[in-house]
Amino acid sequence: MDLYDVMRTTFAAREFTGDPLPDEVLSRIFDNARFAPSGGNRQGAHITVVRDPDTRRCLAQLGIPAARRYFAQRQAGENPWNAVNPTAVPQDVIDATEVPDTFVAPIANAPVVLVVSVDLGVVAAVDQDLDRVGLAGGASVYPLIWNVLLAARNEGYGGTFTTMAVAAEDQVRPLLGIPDQHAIAAVVPLGKPVRQLTKLRRRPVGDFVTRDRFDGPAFAG
């Protein structure tokens, strides 16, 4: 596929056919995705390829508590898991919130689930001393994950970027033998999508790109 076509049509695939994702295809995906940039080119990311059905189901279950809070906050009109505006939803309401099966199914049903972690010993978190949630350290791992999804799309496969299991990191680590110094960045189910979307909805460039200053005029090509 043309690069721009891949960029404009890589969607969040959550429903998969029963088709397998062969190691040969995965190898091509990883072989190309590995050229993603990372802080200082330290390449501290690690991908654990999970095919075992029981382990996949366990990963799906571990994400449910965080998902309960996500959906409870959405129902209350909040921005879920936002670090600036803490939730006002009571814990008992969160605990009673049902999580749609469509949220758990991708991880439980995908032929392959990737658990991506990063070695905190090589992450350059240049915003660690600022009085806000850290973001810069993600530059050492998230470009790789996106490259995996782009490469999967190019191969006719797809997946989705999930982070709910991150909140259960202490339980995911022993499940997969992940060392303490590695932070879990994402859980990515991959497979053959039931359908391939070709048109995505995104904000126009002028809505989020400005010239010279944040409050400058909208960028127009």
Image (cartoon, rainbow, N blue to C red):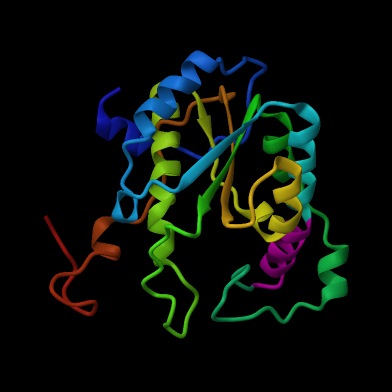
The prevailing secondary structure element of the residues shown in magenta is helix
Residue 16 position, x and y percent, is 63, 26
For the question of whether residue 62 can be seen, the reply is yes
Q: Is residue 86 above or below residue 74?
A: below
Q: Is residue 97 left or right of residue 136?
A: right
Q: Is residue 64 above or below residue 218?
A: above
Residue 188 position, x and y percent, is 58, 40
Q: Quadrant of residue 192?
A: top right
Q: Residue furthest bottom?
A: 131
For the question of whether residue 156 can be seen, the reply is no
- Name which residue lies at 46% across and 31% down: 197
Along the line of sight, the residue nearer the viewer: 87 or 148:
148
Q: Quadrant of residue 91?
A: bottom right
Q: Is residue 46 left or right of residue 220?
A: right
**Is residue 190 in the magenta section?**
no
Residue 25 position, x and y percent, is 47, 17
Q: Is residue 86 above or below residue 6?
A: below
Residue 46 position, x and y percent, is 51, 42
Quarter of the image for the N terminus: give it. Answer: top left
Q: Which residues are magenta?
A: 65-77
- Name which residue lies at 76% across and 77% down: 89
- Name which residue lies at 33% across and 41% down: 36
